[in-house]
Amino acid sequence: MPAAGLQKPPSCWAVLSQDRVTIVLLAVGQDLYLLDNTSCSVVTPPGMSPSAGAYLQMAVSFNYRCLALFTDTGYIWMGLATLKEKLCEFNCSLRAPPKQMVWCMRPRSRQRAVVMAWDRQLMVVGNSTECIQYPLGRRDWGRSRRPAQAPRAAAAPSSPGCRCPQEAQRSPGGSAGSERSGPLVRLAELRGPSPALLRGSPLSLRVPPRLVLRRLYPLAIRICEYLRLSEIQGVSRILAHWACYKVQQKDKSDEEVAYAINQKLGDTPGISYSEIAARAYDCGRTELAIKLLEYEPRSGEQVPLLLKMKRSKLALSKAIESGDTDLVYTVVLHLKNELNRGTFFMTLQNQPVALSLYRQFCKHQERETLKDLYNQDDNHQELGNFHVHSSYSEKRIEGRVAALQNAVDEYYKAKNEFAAKATEDQIKLLRLQRHLQEDFDKPYLDLSLHDTVSTLILDGHHKKAEQLYRDFKIPDKRYWWLKINALATRGDWEEMEKFSKSKKSPIGYLPFVEIAVKHHNRYEAKKYAPRVTPEQRVKAFILVGCVGAGGAPGGAPGGARGQGWGWVQRRS
């Protein structure tokens, strides 16, 4: 909760629940404060009289929908707990705050009301201008004592029967009754306390906790079963208390106590072996706590207690067995802070899963620690990858080249010839790009080899592009595709035609037609259609649009002009 900045303690407060969010409403004098998990704001109930006074008591209904406020002037405000609507108000003219104030509802009409209790008065206030009051004076003695009535024997001397002894003797309860009559003798016998004088406590929910404190566990369980309490609320709680008492017995070994507890509890729902183990650890019985944790099915409860008991390696094993990566990360970071660097790395070496997860963590959080891990494992391949990745974070070209050179050395140690040669080519390209950038005053750094050659062609530096083609041994087909695309993008059709005649095209001449058509230049495309191989010539003429009676393309022999589609078929 945020700090409310109050200068004095609140006079009353209550907990509200709105949209699954817990909110605290507290009163200080005439001000109401509404606190949630992010803010604190002052609120005013709608329709609240300015002369209402300071708030002394508040009550929230059981469903958290209604709220009642009581002020020092006897003013009662009732409304919704959202503080957006008032239901009613009432002035009870009592300035003393009630001992208790709760909401109630009539079962049939569903009308809401507030019940307030003082020492000698009970008041019910609802949506009305009147209220119901119940005075609570001293209890009438006539309710607690039997009516005064003289016994029959006390009235006998003045009755006519006193003058008839024979009739009086035959009267079973009379004053002249026989001394040895059966009922009188049995009543006069001293047989111990009268059952009427023995008073017992009712079997309520208060009895089992008292029996547990007296360690009368079987009796407490019997009473819970008699009261039909759920197993979690009744028997399970009593068994948990019994187990916590059992771990304090010093006269039995850890194995005996752990076995006895497991035999008694088994898989009883609602019992946490971790809580019993924590109790055993507090009593100084660490080994017993570890044995009890073996019966705990939830790894999330085992691991924190094992870490508390300084059994970090066992906690790591349990976390890995659980398959919960968050739990493994928790233990690994705890080990990192607890152990020195060398011992920590050796511990992870014995746990491949934990080591793999820690590497993933270091890749995003601690890059230098990742380098130390690779060095300890002599993992030259990953060290090379590490240096390549680090080179991209270098701002100066010299630092980047140095990092890549370290990667080359590691790749050679890992006997990865391809990665080493590719990294050397990258170093060579970086140095060449720096010179190009200095010569042409244009950014070339961080471009790929393909983009570098393409940019040079687009800028008209054909000799430089040819140099990169030879130095980096770019395949012929790739270079021809790259160059004709760049020339078409630049619109340098003359250079493209010149390039097509420089030597036999390794990719054929259909790509020349397709690229020219793609750039909406069918005139140039027609120049290359006759040079296409017979297998692809039909497709080329279709692309350039020479399929009608208009004759052969411009590059066709003169005798073929005007012959149209028939000429194409004969030539193909």
Image (cartoon, rainbow, N blue to C red):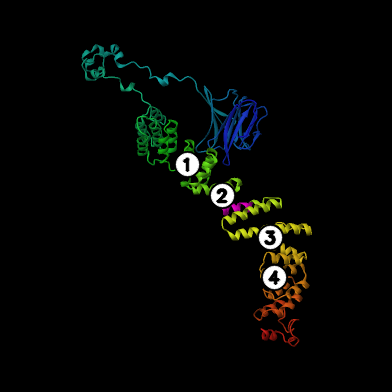
Is 446 above or below relative to 136?
A: below
**Which type of secondary structure does the marked residue at label 4 adopt?**
helix
Give x and y (percent) for residue 384.
60, 53
Is 142 above or below relative to 286?
A: above
- Front residue of 156/265: it is 265
- Front residue of 507/116: it is 507
Image quarter for residue 292? top left
Q: Amino acid at mark 4?
A: Trp
Task: Report the residue marked by disc 2.
Answer: 374
Foreground: disc 1 or disc 2: 2
Asked if residue 365 shows in the view, the reply is no
**Which type of secondary structure does the marked residue at label 1 adopt?**
helix
Q: Amino acid at mark 1?
A: Lys
Q: Is residue 127 left or right of residue 147?
A: right
- Front residue of 251/345: it is 345
**Which type of secondary structure does the marked residue at label 3 adopt?**
loop
Give x and y (percent) for residue 32.
64, 31
Image quarter for residue 494? bottom right
Task: Report the residue marked by disc 4.
Answer: 480
Q: Does label 3 or label 1 sit earlier along the sequence?
A: 1
Q: Does label 2 or label 4 sit earlier along the sequence?
A: 2
Q: Quadrant of the C terminus?
A: bottom right
> Would you call the spot at circle 2 few (<14 residues within 10 Å), some (14-19), or many (20 or more)?
some
> Would you call the spot at circle 1 few (<14 residues within 10 Å), some (14-19), or many (20 or more)?
some
- Front residue of 86/33: it is 33
Q: Does label 3 or label 2 sit earlier along the sequence?
A: 2
Q: Does label 1 or label 2 sit earlier along the sequence?
A: 1
Distance from the alpha carbon under mark 4 to that under mark 3: 17 Å
Task: Report the residue marked by disc 1.
Answer: 313
Does the magenta run of residues contain 497? no
Magenta range: 374-389
Distance from the alpha carbon under mark 3 to that under mark 1: 48 Å
